[in-house]
Image (cartoon, rainbow, N blue to C red):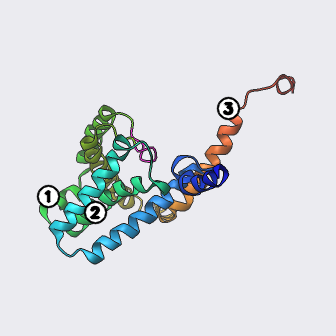
């Protein structure tokens, strides 16, 4: 009985806690459930106010789940709940990108990008350790502020780099960066394997035979 329970536990929770070789693959199941849950909400809930309230409840539960219960949800679903809130905010920004305030946030000047990056950087350090995989969000309201503002700043930096590398030989650099961005999921998976290999060799203690060699 204990053996079968162990198999079931590994099947459901290994991705949430520990995954061999590429630990960051928890992100894949979390992203999968973000897509599924958000599509269901979009399909069956037509009232925007009700949609906002439901997503607010789901996202809030995702951030406090480990504080309320002593267990994690399987396949990093609690992380997916937080991702639904971030996804929803992104959709709202996209749908209102023509409005003056949103438009100004999405089209910052270089000086504004530098100042905003500095301010958000300070806020990130003030908030403490953040880890969506282990459901650690420090001061939760500041986590949401930093997550949204950081995403906006990164978007502006990306647009700046795209414009900078749109001429001459820099077009090659632009195309390579675009390729990496389009295949970011693949890079995440391969990156974890590289990190594992490097960590294995750098953390291995040198034996006397190795020193002699």
First along the sequence among labels 2 and 1: 2
Residue carrying label 1 = 101
Q: How many marks?
A: 3
The main secondary structure of the magenta stretch is loop
| Spatial CA span between label 3 and label 1 | 49 Å
- Dot in front, 3 or 1: 3
Can residue 110 be seen here? The reply is yes
* Residue at x-position 23% and y-position 46%: 112
**Image position, residue 118 (x, y; %):** 29, 38
- Dot in front, 3 or 2: 2
Q: Is residue 108 magenta?
A: no
- Crowd tier of the residue under label 3, counting other residues whose Cα lies within 10 Å: few below 14, some 14–19, many 20 or above: few
Furthest residue to the left? 100
Q: Tell me, yes or no, whether the two marked residues, 2 and 1, touch with CB atoms within 8 Å.
A: no
Q: Is residue 146 above or below residue 203?
A: below
Residue carrying label 3 = 203
Residue carrying label 2 = 88
- Crowd tier of the residue under label 1, counting other residues whose Cα lies within 10 Å: few below 14, some 14–19, many 20 or above: few
- Crowd tier of the residue under label 2, counting other residues whose Cα lies within 10 Å: few below 14, some 14–19, many 20 or above: some
Q: Is residue 112 left or right of residue 17?
A: left
């Amino acid at each position: 009985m204990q053996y079968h329970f162990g198999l079931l536990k590994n099947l459901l929770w290994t991705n949430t806690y520990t995954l061999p070789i590429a630990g960051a693959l928890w992100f894949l199941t979390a992203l999968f459930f973000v897509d599924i849950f958000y599509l269901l909400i979009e399909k069956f809930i037509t009232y925007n106010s009700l949609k906002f309230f439901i997503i607010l409840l789901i996202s809030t539960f995702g951030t406090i789940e480990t504080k309320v219960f002593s267990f994690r949800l399987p396949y990093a679903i609690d992380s997916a709940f937080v991702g639904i809130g971030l996804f929803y905010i992104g959709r709202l920004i996209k749908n209102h990108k023509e409005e003056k305030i949103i438009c100004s946030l999405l089209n910052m000047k270089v000086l504004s990008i530098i100042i905003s990056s500095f301010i958000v950087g300070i806020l990130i350090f003030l908030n403490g350790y953040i880890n969506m995989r282990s459901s650690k969000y420090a001061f939760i309201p500041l986590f949401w502020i930093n997550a949204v503002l950081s995403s906006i700043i990164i978007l502006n930096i990306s647009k700046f780099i795209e414009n900078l590398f749109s001429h001459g030989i820099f077009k090659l650099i632009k195309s390579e960066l675009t390729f990496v961005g389009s295949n970011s999921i693949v890079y995440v998976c391969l990156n974890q394997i590289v990190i594992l290999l490097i960590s294995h060799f750098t953390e291995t203690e040198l034996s006397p035979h190795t020193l002699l060699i």
